Image (cartoon, grey):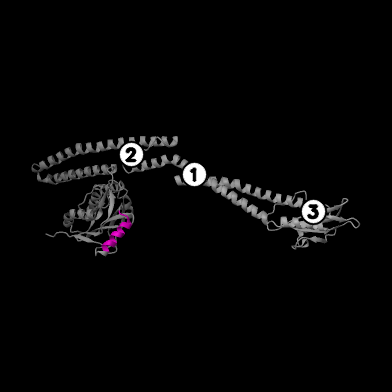
Amino acid sequence: MRRRLLITYLVFTAVLLLGTEIPLGFNLAMNDYHHLVIRQVSGTSGLASAAETDTPEGGVRASAAWQARADAYGSERNATVLLLDVRGRQVYRTRSGPRVEDEAEWKKVLDKALAGQSSVPMDYPFNISAQPLFVAEPVLQHGETVGAVATITPTRSLRAQVATDALLLLAVGLAGLLASALIGIPLVRWSLGPAHRLQEAVRKISRGEYSVRAPADRGPIELRELAEAVNAMTDRLVSVLEAQRSFVADASHQMRNPLTALRVRVESLEGVVPPPGQGSLRVAIAEADRLSRILDELLTLAHASAGDAGTATIEVRSVVESRAQAWSDQAAGADVTIAVQGRPAAAACLPGALEQVLDVLLDNAISFSPPGGRVTVRTRSDNTWVYVEVEDEGPGMADADKAQSTNRFWQGRQPAGRRGSGLGLAIATALLSTSGARLEMEDARPHGLIVRAVLPRLVPASALSRSTEAGSDSGGPSSSGPDVTAAVRPHRG
């Protein structure tokens, strides 16, 4: 935002400078042209006044004195001086050059001079082209026109002066733009510095650092008021979270103990319940166990939603191996093989969150895999993310079910003998989202489901590249080599 505001300020300043300097440049160029015309008209009039006339015939002639004066004027102004009689015939010319007859505009100006009309009324157009400037003045004898003096002056000096003025204006504009930048940078920092600090504070608060407060003592009054409002909102949020945390702790204590006592009392009825009621008793005990699990999952979900413990660095491969080993007995009971593939990678996650996510995913994958099936837990990474995939060989999931599967208490088609709570994937999603991670699902081929936990990666790709190159040189595994695979086989008794 700071950069955009500074660029906007400089663009606005540049537009103002251009809007001022472009008309000024045209004005300077026109003034230079008018000065050139005035000087040439004045010089031409002086030469016309000094021209000598032949009294008997009423013509003109170029005396030696006049020729010297005309040559001096031509040398000084880099101009060509022409003396013409009343019929337009050339009497004297200081240097060779274009002929008047070849230029229609020059011929009109000369005809006006021979008709006795002076060029003094300055109605000439603005012109800084390469066309030389032509001025003609009548030579009079007793009030009668007896000839004309014309001067042809190149406009190279005028164009050079205009270019010099343009460069000067450009330099002034650049200096003004630089001065505006030097003034604008401190102003932008003063006005947006508090906004940047407020943004950093809000970002930290959104990550769960609720002890952070936005500075509200510097900057414009509007930003100070906004910072105070953010701090008040954070205080309110902290109080709500504390109330939620207290409620979770109280609910955990007040509900778990009566539920445990209820289960114990129901189990104690096993000896006095007649055989026809034993089935209902077992169902009651199972429902009590299920209610206990739902309560534990609700408490876990509440803690995951609060998620203010902060992230930690974890080594994903070791966590995957430990959870695969922990679920090996259940996999063996279901006649399912758990295979672990992939290389070590460091990621950011809440402490213990990946373990709980893998417990949910492995529980689902084992439950939905057919006997003799295989559950593959795969780790891989790119420059930004670390991916932990759990792939099963079950029936898979429809696209509509994938969209709803992370909703609380949603239950899709369940395998025989399984009664879930509908909270597992919701817990996994909440645990991952608090650390900037996410949960993805896609179909496996030829059948099954891949559930992927995507975690922020901590090790830069350049460092990994150097380490893998070093490992390759020493005979160790490289990033282009095969994945490391470990399998946990089911025990057959």
Horizontal and vertical percent for residue 127? Answer: 69, 54
Q: Give the residue displayed 68% in from the left and 58% down from the top.
A: 130
Location of the C terminus (image quadrant): bottom left
- Dot 2 or dot 3: first in sequence order is 3
Indicate the position of residue 404 as horizontal and vertical percent values: 32, 50
Image spot of residue 168 (x, y percent): 59, 50
Q: Where's the N terminus, which quadrant? A: top left
* CA distance for labels 3 and 1: 56 Å
Residue assigned mark 2: 212
3 or 1: mark nearer the eye? 3
Earlier-in-chain disc, 2 versus 1: 1
Which of the two marks, 2 or 3, is nearer to us in this view? 3
| Residue at mark 3 | 47
Q: Is residue 243 above or below residue 96?
A: above
The mark tally for this picture is: 3
* Residue 165 seen: yes
Mark 3 belongs to which amino acid? Leu
Q: Which residue is mark 1?
A: 182
Q: Give the CA separation, mark 2 to mark 1.
A: 33 Å
Specify the amino acid type for callout 1. Answer: Leu
Circles 3, 1 touching at the beta carbon (< 8 Å): no
Question: Range of the magenta residues?
Answer: 459-472
